[in-house]
Amino acid sequence: MSIEEAQQRVDEWIRTVGIRYYNELTNTAILMEEVGEVARLMARIYGEQSFKTKEAEATAQEDLAGEMADVLFVLICLANQTGVNLSDALEASLEKKTRRDAQRHAENRKLR
């Protein structure tokens, strides 16, 4: 699915199943909560923290995918609410990063 399609599908879901969008501040708080859940899993899967149970460890990768999708869902909600076209915004961000960082990364000895 394209980013534009994702924005349309989330909007349709919100307006039918979700009834309406939460306000922008509430969605920002929810986004931070979801990012925290991704961070918790990353610390356990790739970092030094351990899981509390073997069952939690067994489903961690699947859980990570779901939490990342939750982050994306709420981010799309915020984009829809604020009139941001995420496709255009991502394209502009990639162009900016390419102009700004191409030489910096090429010359960074730490990346070799």
Image (cartoon, rainbow, N blue to C red):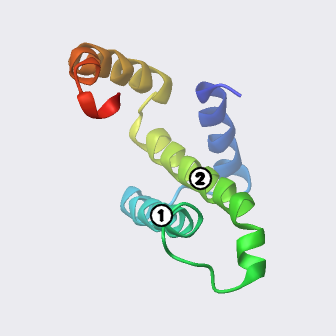
Q: Is residue 80 or residue 87 the one in the foreground?
A: 87
Residue 37 location in percent, x, y?
Answer: 53, 68
Query: In the image, what residue occupies the spot 38% across and 20% down?
Result: 94
Q: Is residue 44 or residue 70 the one in the foreground?
A: 44
The image's mark for residue 39 is 1
Eyeballing the image, is 40 above or below 13?
below
Q: Is residue 54 or residue 16 the one in the foreground?
A: 54
Query: In the image, what residue occupies the spot 22% across and 15% down?
Result: 103
Left or right: 92, with 85 as reference point: left
Nearest to N terminus: mark 2 or mark 1: 1
Residue 14 location in percent, x, y?
Answer: 64, 51
Eyeballing the image, is 103 above or below 74?
above
Using the numbered discs, state the Cα–Cα distance from disc 2 to disc 1 in whole angstroms.
10 Å
Query: In the image, what residue occupies the spot 72% across and 77% down?
Result: 56
Q: What is the secondary structure assignment of the residue under circle 2?
A: helix
Eyeballing the image, is 99 above or below 66?
above
